[in-house]
């Protein structure tokens, strides 16, 4: 029995992984920075949470509009920001330990990468894309992982 990957089964060309050296010390320092920032975000979110609790207990009443803004910042800092930064730091460390050339990740922060991202976002918005993953073939949007079979059919029809 021969086992093939999704890409191999469909005849897709998959480039070889980038080969390079990994500076583990640099990755560990970067990981530590991400974890420190995530801890600061968690602390800031906690302080905002204390302000919310004081307002709910009528100890230090704030206006309803400000309360909503503080609640939003609290949620972002405590959950989204903290989890994202902590996860990103650990991800860099794991990828480096597995031998990934982390310079490729650093390149993703370059100005030209940001410009490409902005241009692709504009193209997607202009095409009517509203979520991810989305694929546009001949003006037809295929949205969602459960539509890949329809996307494949459209691509085969287009290639025929």
Image: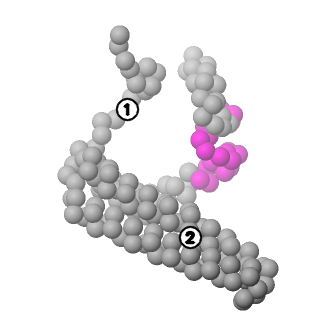
Q: Looking at the picture, tell me which residue is in the foreground, 154 or 80.
A: 80
| Disc 2 from disc 1: Cα separation | 38 Å
Q: Is residue 16 left or right of residue 148?
A: left
Residue at the image position 68 percent from the left and 73 percent from the top: 71
Contact? badges 2 and 1 (CB < 8 Å): no
Q: Position of residue 33 (x, y in %)?
A: 36, 70
Question: Residue 14 shows which numbered tag?
Answer: 1
Question: Residue 77 shows which numbered tag?
Answer: 2
State which tag comes first along the sequence, 2 or 1: 1
Q: Looking at the picture, tell me which residue is in the foreground, 67 or 105.
A: 67
Q: Is residue 132 left or right of residue 112?
A: right
The quarter of the picture where residue 108 lies is bottom left
Label 1, residues with CA under 10 Å away: few <14, some 14-19, many ≥20: few
Mark 1 element type? loop
Vertical order, 109 against 50 (above or below)? above
Residue at the image position 43 percent from the left and 26 percent from the top: 7
Vertical order, 51 against 99 (above or below)? below
**Residue 137 appears anywhere in the view:** no
Mark 2 element type? helix
The quarter of the picture where residue 57 lies is bottom right
Label 2, residues with CA under 10 Å away: few <14, some 14-19, many ≥20: many
Magenta highlight range: 121-140
Question: Residue 101 shows which numbered tag?
Answer: none
Q: Position of residue 82 (x, y in %)?
A: 50, 66
Q: Is residue 20 left or right of residue 139?
A: left
Image quarter of the C terminus? top right
């Amino acid at each position: 029995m021969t086992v093939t990957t999704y890409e191999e089964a469909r005849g897709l060309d998959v480039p070889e992984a980038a080969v390079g050296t990994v500076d583990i010390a640099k990755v560990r320092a970067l990981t530590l920075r991400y974890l420190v920032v995530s801890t600061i975000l968690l602390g800031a979110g906690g302080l905002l949470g204390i302000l919310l609790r004081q307002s709910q207990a009528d100890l230090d009443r704030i206006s309803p509009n400000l309360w909503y803004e503080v609640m939003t910042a609290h949620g972002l800092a405590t959950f989204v920001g903290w989890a994202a930064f902590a996860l990103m730091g650990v991800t860099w460390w794991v990828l480096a330990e597995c031998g990934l050339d982390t310079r490729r990740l650093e390149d993703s922060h370059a100005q030209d990468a940001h410009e490409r991202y902005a241009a692709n976002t504009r193209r997607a918005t202009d095409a009517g894309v509203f979520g991810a993953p989305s694929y546009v073939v001949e003006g037809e949007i295929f949205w969602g992982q459960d539509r890949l079979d329809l996307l494949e059919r459209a691509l085969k029809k287009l290639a025929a």
